[in-house]
């Protein structure tokens, strides 16, 4: 068995040949609806293991490009696919870099105009709320201040490792999950 290597491609490299890729966005449905690469399919990272058979079929037809907001989740997706023997590339800098360089972004929303906040905003709200709660309750119960300290340490760890445990937890909330019908339709489209 040969080793599958993970490639990273820059937005400028992809823009000129976007149609050569099968693009899979591994962000939550709300993040995807807020803006994604044209023609991208949405399979959240925590559902990728179920998609391996269709990803294998898609890779047999052409190049796979995994995309997320910054490139971290898509790199993780590429590692998971490589472990299954499926080659895939990750978009360096993710959709943030893609949009910052002026490339087109599609917005899709079939939830009546209401989309989930981007994950980064959800993390800021959760972390900020927990810090404030720790400080507020800490005025009455000294040990509650440890909540604020724990969140602060988590944010430092997140920055140092370029990972986010809170985002991983928030991604599991119901409003960040795809509807089963949407996920099955994506699987069917990729399997063709």
Image (spheres, helix red, strand yellow):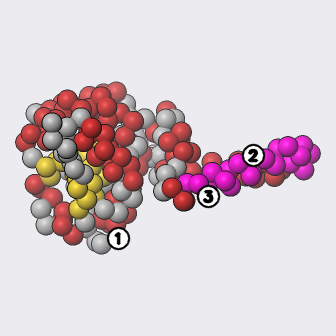
Predominant secondary structure in magenta? helix
> Closer to the camera, 84 or 31?
84
Q: CA distance from mark 1 to mark 3?
A: 26 Å
Mark 1 / mark 2, whichever is N-terminal: 1
Mark 1, residues whose alpha carbon is within 10 Å: few (<14), some, or many (≥20)? few
Which structural element holds mark 3? helix
> Closer to the camera, 50 or 101?
50
Q: For mark 3, what is the residue?
A: 156
Which structural element holds mark 2? helix
Mark 2, residues whose alpha carbon is within 10 Å: few (<14), some, or many (≥20)? some
> Closer to the camera, 185 or 8?
8
The numbered dot on residue 147 is 2
Q: For mark 1, what is the residue?
A: 100
Instruction: Residue lying at the far right in this picture: please name it.
Output: 140
Q: Which residues are magenta?
A: 137-158
- Residue at (51, 55) in percent of width and height: 161
Residue 4 position by quadrant: top left
Residue 183 position by quadrant: top left
Which structural element holds mark 1? helix
User: Residue 148, percent across and down?
Assistant: 74, 51
């Amino acid at each position: 068995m040969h080793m599958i290597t993970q490639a990273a491609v820059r937005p400028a490299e992809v823009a000129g040949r976007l149609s050569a890729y099968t693009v899979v966005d591994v962000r939550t449905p709300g993040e995807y609806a807020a803006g994604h690469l044209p023609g991208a399919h949405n399979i959240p990272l925590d559902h990728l293991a179920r998609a391996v058979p269709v990803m294998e079929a898609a890779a047999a037809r052409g190049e796979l490009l995994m995309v997320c907001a910054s490139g971290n989740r898509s790199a993780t997706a590429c590692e998971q696919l490589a472990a299954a023997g499926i080659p895939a590339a990750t978009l360096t800098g993710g959709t943030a870099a893609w949009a910052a360089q002026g490339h087109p972004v599609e917005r899709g929303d079939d939830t009546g105009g209401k989309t989930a906040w981007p994950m980064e905003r959800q993390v800021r709200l959760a972390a900020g709320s927990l810090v404030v709660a720790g400080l507020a309750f800490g005025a009455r119960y000294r040990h509650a201040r440890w909540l604020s300290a724990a969140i602060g340490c988590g944010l430092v760890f997140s920055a140092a490792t370029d990972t986010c445990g809170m985002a991983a937890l928030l991604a599991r909330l119901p409003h960040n999950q795809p509807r089963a019908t949407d996920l099955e339709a994506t699987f069917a489209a990729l399997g063709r």
